[in-house]
Image (spheres, grey):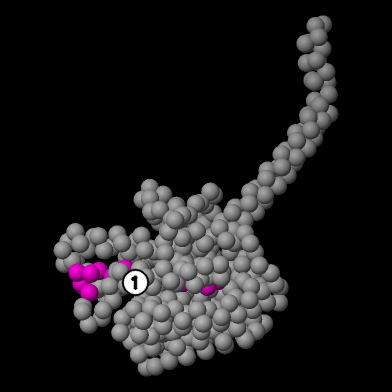
Amino acid sequence: MSDFGSAVHLLVMFPSSSVAHYSLINLIVLLIITFIVALSLRCAISMELSVRFAGSNRFADDAGHDPGSRAADDYFNRRYFDIKHDLISHGDSDLFHRGRTPSSFKKYTKEDVVQCFDFLSSSRQSGNHRPMHFAFVGDSTIRQHFVSFLKWIPDYDRRTTASNSSAFAEYYFHEDRNVTSALLNNLRVSFYWRDLIREEVLADFERWTSASNDGNNPASPDLILLGITAHHVGTNDVSSSLETYVSLLEDKLLPLIKNSLAAHRRQKIVWLHQSRTVVEMTPDAYDIYPDQIDKYNDEIRRVFNGTGVVIWDSINTVVEENVRACAMTAFQRWDQKMYSNCYDFIHPGFGAIALGSHLIFNHLC
């Protein structure tokens, strides 16, 4: 009998033992492959979370500073931000974008924002699950960023409290507001009407500096978006010149900002770079012109240099495109939403403000 015939003969004689032997080997191989695949998937997911939320845990606690979080500031920096339509994600709800760069920011959905906030809240140290607090402090442009920011936060159980009685006003109000949501881990988003550097805003930073971030005390904000420029450029009863404004900024406000950052190492303070006004539409009574704004912005940048305060000037690229679009239509574009038309000489349209909200979420998340 040939060797082949002998082999067949043996398999016929001992079919069960041979099959069992090979089945056992196949099972062992399959288990090894399954373990390797599972381990690889776990590592990949861990890497995705690390990449996607790089720097996000800077709000986790006040125990130490995370130097790696500085890269996220590029979304606020005009030098690193360049709008490219082919790199903007439209309607993409996948949070885990590998290799995302400041020039290819993600366009967020409400679902994305909820997942991001859940991650930020859960990343806090055990026993320190205090609510996250985002504060918008400043004039009417800061107010519009506050209004836009809220549009990406689902209204599950939102509660709004106002310092006056005009809580029904959606866009136009000169008052403090607090918006909270228990279902979103007691999230708090606040707006503080501070059009000039005077007692109110100084008191805010004194209070936040002395506030303890223990337990459920949300008094000290995790992120402060600050912008108090336009009203000082125009006629006001606080500062009569650029020199007076710089003195208020440098001698009064800056020391308190530094104290707050020192007391809360994970806190982030972002100063909104004042956009240039539209000369053709600027009423003489306001006396706020682009050349004046440039001088104020230059001094602001000098004062905050090296302090840890981030200057947000990337939004200006969007605002400038908004102004160009208005110029191309002879400033006749109009719709029903407040601050969305070309007759407004100082407030960006809500399309530009909405892109600003996406920049904030890209920074946070």
Answer whether residue 278 is magenta in the image.
Answer: yes
Left/right placement of residue 129 relative to residue 74 reads right
Q: Can I make out residue 303 in this image?
A: yes
Quadrant hosting residue 78: bottom left
The residue positioned 38% from the left and 85% from the top of the image is 239
**Is any part of residue 150 visible from this angle?**
no
Q: Quadrant of the N terminus?
A: top right
User: Residue at 36% across / 50% down in the picture?
Assistant: 85
In the rendered image, the residue lying farthest to the top is 1
Residue at the spot 19% in from the left edge and 69% down from the top edge: 280
Rendered location of residue 27, percent (x, y): 76, 37
| Image coordinates for residue 50, horizontal then vertical, percent | 62, 56
Q: Amino acid at mark 1?
A: Ile
Q: Is residue 172 toward the left or the right of residue 356 in the image?
A: left
Residues packed near mark 1 inside 10 Å, few (<14), some (14 to 19) or many (20 plus): many
Say which of 171 and 151 sits in front. 171
Chain part drawn in magenta = 268-282
